[in-house]
Amino acid sequence: MRILVTDPIIARFAELLTQTKRAHEWSFAAELGPAELDDALRGADIVIASVLTPEQAASLRPDALLHVTGAGADRVSVDALPPGVTICNTGHHGAAIAEHVVMTALMLRRRALEADAQMRAGEWRTIGNDASVTFHPMLRGTTMGLLGLGEIGTEVGRLAQALGMRLTALRQRPDAPSPDGLDVAEVYGPDRMLDFVAGADVLVVSIPLSDHTRGTIGAAELAVAKPDLLLINVARGGVVDEDALFDALSEGRIGGAGIDVWWGAPDSQGRVPASVDRFSPLANTVLTPHYSGHARQVFELRAADIARNIDLRADGQPLERVIR
């Protein structure tokens, strides 16, 4: 089969990606000129990609397999794909993102960035020598609200539970069984969003972005939040209303935020989007460049998933993780 890889990250794992039972004709976008890439897209049996423009998507063969290199296909112009194109995804990012969430929550609760800056400036400030320094609270005994109980929400919940946190969640079907190993104290439906937010000490956003979920956390939700709420968004920027979050943080109405996903994207020179510049002066934030899932093990497992699906396709067997 003719296989085209356009995702530059998964291409770095080509040795694992190409460990298939049969030999195939591989092309990597980084090695192709614009015209060659267009030809490869039109002729490929399998395209492995994270991003496809409408023109690129429309050029795929009607019987092609599009294998996205993560869980979401929101950067692929799905509506432009020929109707017969099959789409598969992969995952394995939940545990890595869960570590990031807990790290970020601890950094915010314990004022790690502030203390680090003071030490680097030659200041030793603790409760032992400065009465204005506050005691930091522990995560143990507090409530973590999980907005979404997919792979990410489940892995975050497992780590939070190990730290002694109480779990709540909001999901479309509140009566569905909780994932194995999670003791969720209360599961809310979408009609109880305000109750869910009001009860959380740490709110983790991990639902996909869609027209339905855009702006799920907005001014009304943040208005009922606890004054020390930590909001950690590892989903997509648009799930949270940018203006509402900025106002709540800058006015001190919530305790802090960990923002790993953004409104807008970096430019071709790697310059941050305007939303980063907007939030960067706020001391009650931890800002990261959408890298919470960027652990090597994640991509090794993803490459193995894709290689396995290539073998299944070659053998005419049902594929794994089909989303269309």
Image (spheres, rainbow, N blue to C red):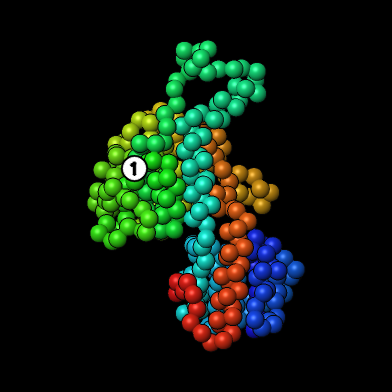
Q: Residue at x 61, y 44 (%)?
A: 272
Q: Position of residue 283 (x, y in %)?
A: 52, 29
Q: Quadrant of residue 207?
A: bottom left
Q: Position of residue 212 (x, y in %)?
A: 35, 58
Q: Residue at x 34, y 42 (%)?
A: 166
Quick check: can you spot residue 10? yes
Q: Position of residue 182 (x, y in %)?
A: 36, 53
Q: Residue at x 53, y 87 (%)?
A: 316
Q: Amino acid at mark 1?
A: Arg
The mark total stands at 1
Q: Is residue 267 above or below residue 308?
A: above
Q: Position of residue 32 (x, y in %)?
A: 74, 70
On the rendered image, what quadrant is the C terminus found in? Answer: bottom left
Quick check: can you spot residue 59? no
On the rendered image, what quadrant is the N terminus found in? Answer: bottom right
Q: Is residue 231 left or right of residue 274?
A: left
**Crowd band around label 1 with a 10 angstrom C-alpha radius: few (<14), some (14–19), many (20+):** many
The residue nearer to you, when weighing 320 against 243, is 320
Q: Is residue 268 above or below residue 31?
A: above
Q: Quadrant of residue 123?
A: top right
The residue nearer to you, when weighing 49 against 149, is 149
Q: Secondary structure at mark 1?
A: strand
Q: Is residue 43 left or right of residue 181?
A: right
Q: Residue at x 45, y 53 (%)?
A: 155
Q: Which residue is mark 1?
A: 166
